[in-house]
Image (cartoon, rainbow, N blue to C red):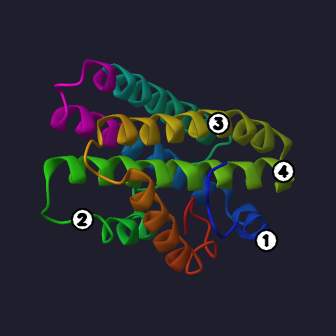
């Protein structure tokens, strides 16, 4: 369903299990960045009331996820680490069209966002199925559905408002690019790393 070309190696979970504090901190910041992304999309596309409503809902949900991860960190007596750069996201950003039309830029932003949500959903699924910690397995199973929904919303708006852009062709290009870079990731205790 998600269209990802290369699945995450389930052994990534072994890396995650060695440093739960790091993965939870990284996950919290991913949720914060996702909320900020949704707000930024609103700022640049406020002429679409349906988009604004849905992005507000995503932003609220992502903040709520940040809160849930933070509560889990505190419950376990851990500490929220400082935010780190997400190299995977930075690599994806390099593929975004620079210049071009406003519509093409919008489509790319939505597809970029959809791809991050798709990979996060896939990582949550891997965690839910393979992590030994039953509380975390249930937690990630719950969040997986939300990420899949966000992915669908972003793709849907790319298609709806991407008039004059071959959205399906561009989505295939995004998937191919992500396939090229994803092999560099899945080796660290970060959500995308």
Q: Earlier in the sequence, mark 2 or mark 4?
A: 2
**Residue at left 29%, top 52%?**
165
Q: Which residues are magenta?
A: 35-52
- Nearest to N terminus: mark 2 or mark 1: 1
Point out the tag, 3 or 2, that comes first from the N-terminus: 2
Q: Is residue 13 above or below residue 157?
A: below
- Crowd class of label 2 (few under 14; some 14 to 19; many from 20; radius 10 Å): some
Residue topped by disc 2 = 97
Mark 2 in CB contact with mark 1 (< 8 angstroms) = no
What secondary structure predominates along the stretch shown in magenta? helix
The mark nearer the N terminus, 4 or 3, is 4
Is residue 80 visible to the viewer in this orientation of the structure? no
Gap between marks 3 and 2 measured at Cα? 30 Å
Name the residue located 49 percent from the left edge and 27 percent from the top edge. 64
Which residue is disc 4 drawn over?
129
In percent of the image, x 66 and y 55: which residue is there? 123
The question of residue 48 being in magenta is answered with yes
State the SS at label 2: loop
Frontmost of labels 3 and 2 is: 2
Distance, label 2 to label 4, CA atoms, is 36 Å
Residue that badge 1 annotates: 11
Q: Which residue is mark 3?
A: 143
């Amino acid at each position: 369903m998600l269209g990802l070309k290369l699945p995450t190696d389930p052994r990534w979970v072994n890396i995650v299990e060695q440093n739960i504090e790091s993965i939870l901190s990284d996950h919290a910041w991913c949720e914060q960045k996702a909320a900020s992304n949704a707000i930024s999309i609103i700022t640049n596309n406020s002429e679409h009331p349906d988009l604004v409503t849905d992005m507000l809902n995503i932003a609220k949900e992502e903040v709520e996820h940040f809160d849930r991860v933070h509560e889990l960190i505190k419950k376990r007596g851990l500490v929220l680490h400082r935010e780190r750069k997400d190299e995977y996201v930075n690599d994806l950003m390099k593929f975004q069209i620079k210049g071009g039309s406003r519509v093409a830029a919008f489509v790319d932003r939505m597809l970029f966002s959809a791809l991050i949500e798709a990979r996060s959903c896939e990582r949550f699924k891997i965690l839910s199925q393979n992590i030994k910690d039953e509380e975390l397995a249930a937690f990630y199973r719950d969040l997986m559905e939300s990420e899949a929904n966000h992915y669908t919303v972003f793709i849907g708006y790319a298609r709806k408002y991407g008039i004059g852009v071959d959205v399906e062709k561009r989505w295939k290009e995004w998937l191919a690019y992500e396939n090229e870079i994803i092999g560099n990731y899945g080796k660290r205790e970060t959500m995308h790393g």
